[in-house]
Image: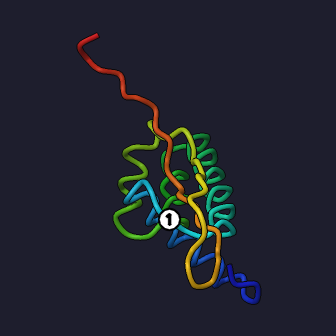
């Protein structure tokens, strides 16, 4: 994460959260993964607590494009985020982490 400018850091986290919601699994460095996990958990808990209009405003503030609708549609299935260490990137020896969304199993209508 860039240390100098907080607005750059916020945009980076917003972009990572958008990618995570759309693909449900991303690979990034460990430092970004830690920041992403805490930001996503905060968004998830705040969104589940608030009412409809407040939910929409929170999501629009923290996600880009089509990720907003997907997040709001699937919010009840999301449990959290998991970080899995996968090794070291060649070239700069940065620790790589897979970040994935944990989901509840949907209840089937047959049972």
In the image, 109: left or right of 91? left
Q: Position of residue 91 (x, y in %)?
A: 58, 85
Which image quadrant: the N terminus? bottom right
Q: Is 107 situated above or below 16?
A: above
> What residue is at 34 percent from the left and 64 percent from the top?
66
Q: Residue furthest bottom?
A: 4
Residue 64, horizontal then vertical, whole percent: 44, 70
Front residue of 22/50: it is 22
Element on which disc 1 rests: strand
Relative vertical location of residue 100 with respect to residue 109 in this rendering, above or below: below
User: What residue is at 42 percent from the left and 54 percent from the top?
Assistant: 24
User: Tag 1: Cα neighbours inside 10 Å, few (<14), some, or many (≥20)?
Assistant: some
Residue 37: which quarter of the image?
bottom right
Disc 1 target residue: 27
> From what the image shows, is residue 10 above or below residue 59?
below
Q: Position of residue 67 (x, y in %)?
A: 39, 61
- Considering every residue shown, the one lying at the far right of the view is 4
Q: Quadrant of the C terminus?
A: top left
Q: Is residue 67 left or right of residue 88?
A: left
Closer to the camera in the image, 71 or 100: 100
Q: Is residue 42 left or right of residue 19?
A: right
């Amino acid at each position: 994460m860039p240390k100098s400018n907080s607005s750059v850091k916020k945009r980076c986290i917003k972009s990572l959260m958008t990618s995570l919601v759309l693909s449900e699994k991303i690979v990034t460095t460990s430092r970004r993964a830690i920041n992403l996990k805490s930001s996503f958990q905060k968004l998830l808990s705040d969104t589940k607590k608030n009412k409809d209009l407040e939910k929409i405003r929170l999501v629009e503030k923290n996600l880009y494009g089509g990720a907003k609708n997907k997040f709001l549609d699937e919010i009840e299935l999301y449990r959290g985020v998991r970080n899995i260490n996968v090794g070291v990137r060649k070239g700069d020896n940065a620790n790589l982490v897979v970040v994935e969304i944990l989901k509840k199993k949907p209840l089937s209508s047959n049972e």
